[in-house]
Image (spheres, rainbow, N blue to C red):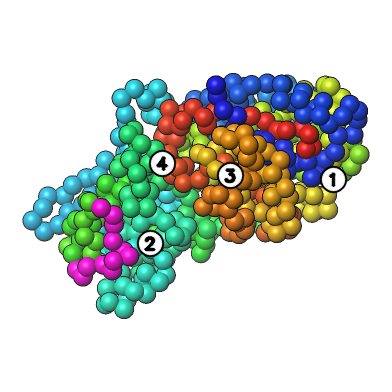
């Protein structure tokens, strides 16, 4: 028997604070009805439809994924529209990386992830965009390597204190601790000619690697954006609507929010191969790798990296999908639920586990409406585009509708990586802390019928409610631009990194991830 996944249950319990069932019969009727109006198979079908191909923002495949969302919501008789924006996106055209050292021939890195026998997504993987860092500057560098730990400012301060000169060198840093855009920016500010970021197994493979376990395989590569801003880089602080004024691509790429130097991501295996040839002083203990790793040294050299990257920064069309369930008593007051659709690869965890939950939620709400239910306030369902590049779709929509949203929005509920394991991971603005706690008490732990989700949450390592700072997901514009109380929620943490940008397809995710069950309507 497939277990019922608690994320949509939690979403529904959160909605309860803002909505009331306004018509007879009693809430228990709607609770029972809601739980009978579908199966786990429907959410799984949405997830499979959305992840059959890689669907990076601005591509045909992502437009087809948008069509699936539109057709699903429109079939429910909810007013649904596509809101397009023309924005600056970044794609790789060419890249190469080779390693050399005195007395050793140059070795070219393949810069690809290994495939695995029996992977049903192997053929579709040919459509995956080559590993890259979006908005990295085009250019070349051939220079000695300096190891910079996590690429933080304090790491470069330590290198300077040890007399290690980074100017003109290739900075090698590992993922973790800070945003990848800051890793590249800090390398640039230290004088590096280029940056390489690797996924250290010490941080991302604490157990057995895929396919023998759930953790990041040795050739897994994390890709992502290096843009430090949010929204369309050519329309900072105003909406990228049709015919709008915009700065030139050249000017947008030269701002301080862009990396300004060539940069590439590499796997843990490639990172360790580079470090085996780096000399100089031994790095501090907390700069070292895990078991089986070579001794990490500071450099510079004698290892030399020859890096070339060519990117294509172009204005492309993105598509938000907006659907409205009008409230009966307060139709001019909005509770907004958002999830993004675009993915670096297949997106089975990030973000389409959340998209599947969004669509299943909509389908069941539609069935409830057909039985006489109405929400008190208007529900707006939003499927954002180009989140991965810098929260672009949600930011442009907020910028375009700033006045209306500021005056009418009660709360924004965000689901990004909806499902990535067990446990609860939730963050909020302080106004909604109590809401999160009370909602989780009303949802049953699917693994233990005598406990609530709150009990599971409190027993976990992430029992504290996090704060929504920075630009981690699409809540950013709502919180930081217009001050809307917001929640970001997920089921599971940690395991997600096993598949992050690692051909994140359904074949890499336990079947339980597809078992999404929806809201307990007693709490609407």
Q: Position of residue 296 (x, y in %)?
A: 24, 61
Q: Which residue is mark 4?
A: 498
Question: In 3D space, how far apart are the residues under numbered discs 2 and 4 (Cα atoms)?
Answer: 19 Å
Q: Quadrant of residue 499?
A: top left
Instruction: Report the side of 426 relative to 121 (left or right).
Output: right
Earlier residue among tags 2 and 4 = 2
Q: Quadrant of residue 214?
A: top left
Q: Determine whether 274 is above or below 358 in the image.
A: below
Q: Is residue 239 visible?
A: no
Instruction: Report the side of 227 relative to 223 (left or right).
Output: right
Earlier residue among tags 2 and 3 = 2
Q: Which residue is mark 1?
A: 333
Q: Which residue is mark 2?
A: 150
Q: Position of residue 491 (x, y in %)?
A: 57, 41
Earlier residue among tags 2 and 1 = 2
Which segment did they paint magenta? 280-291
């Amino acid at each position: 028997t497939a277990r019922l996944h608690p994320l949509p249950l939690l979403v529904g319990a959160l909605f309860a604070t803002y909505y009331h069932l306004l018509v007879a019969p009693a809430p228990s009727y709607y609770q029972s009805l809601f739980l009978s109006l579908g199966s786990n198979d429907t959410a799984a079908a949405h997830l499979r439809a959305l992840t059959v191909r890689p669907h990076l923002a601005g591509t045909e495949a992502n437009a087809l994924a948008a069509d699936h969302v539109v057709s699903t919501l429109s079939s429910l008789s909810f007013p649904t529209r596509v809101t397009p924006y023309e924005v600056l996106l970044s794609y790789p055209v060419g890249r190469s990386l080779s390693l050399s050292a005195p007395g050793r021939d140059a070795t070219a890195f393949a810069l690809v992830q290994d495939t695995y026998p029996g992977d049903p997504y192997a053929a579709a993987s040919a459509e995956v965009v080559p590993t890259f860092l979006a908005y990295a500057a085009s250019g070349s560098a051939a220079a000695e390597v300096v190891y910079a730990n996590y690429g933080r400012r304090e790491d470069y301060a330590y290198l300077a204190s040890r007399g290690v000169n980074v100017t003109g060198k290739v900075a090698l840093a590992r993922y973790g601790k800070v945003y990848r855009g800051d890793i590249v920016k800090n390398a640039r500010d230290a004088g590096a000619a280029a940056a390489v970021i690797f996924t250290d197994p010490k941080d991302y493979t604490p157990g057995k690697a895929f396919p023998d376990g759930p953790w990041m395989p040795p050739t897994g590569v994390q890709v992502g954006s290096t843009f430090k801003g949010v929204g369309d880089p050519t329309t900072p602080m105003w909406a990228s609507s049709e015919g709008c004024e915009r700065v030139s691509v050249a000017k947008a790429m030269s701002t301080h929010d862009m990396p300004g130097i060539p940069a590439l991501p590499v796997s843990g295996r490639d990172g360790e191969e580079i470090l085996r040839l780096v000399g100089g002083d031994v790095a501090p203990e907390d700069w070292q790798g895990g078991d089986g790793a070579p001794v990490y040294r500071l450099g510079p050299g004698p290892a030399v990296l020859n890096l070339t990257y060519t990117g294509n920064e172009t204005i492309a069309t993105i598509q938000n999908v907006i659907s409205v369930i009008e409230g009966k008593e307060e139709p001019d007051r909005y509770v907004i639920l958002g999830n993004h659709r675009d993915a670096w690869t297949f997106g089975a965890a990030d973000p389409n586990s959340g998209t599947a939950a969004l669509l299943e939620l909509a389908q069941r709400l539609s069935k409830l409406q057909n039985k006489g239910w109405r929400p008190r306030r208007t529900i707006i369902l939003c499927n954002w585009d180009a989140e991965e590049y810098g929260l672009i779709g949600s930011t442009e929509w907020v910028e375009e509708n700033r006045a209306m949203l500021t005056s009418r929005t009660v709360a924004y509920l965000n689901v990004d990586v909806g499902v990535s394991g067990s446990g609860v991971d939730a963050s909020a603005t302080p106004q909604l802390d109590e809401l999160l706690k009370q909602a989780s008490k009303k949802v049953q732990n699917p693994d233990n019928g005598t406990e609530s989700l709150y009990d599971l949450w409190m027993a976990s390592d992430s029992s504290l409610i996090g704060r929504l700072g920075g630009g981690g997901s699409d809540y950013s514009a709502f919180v930081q631009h217009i001050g809307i109380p917001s929640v970001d929620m997920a089921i599971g943490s940690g395991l997600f990194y096993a598949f992050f940008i690692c051909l994140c397809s359904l074949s890499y995710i336990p079947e339980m991830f597809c078992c999404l069950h929806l809201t307990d309507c007693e709490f609407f």
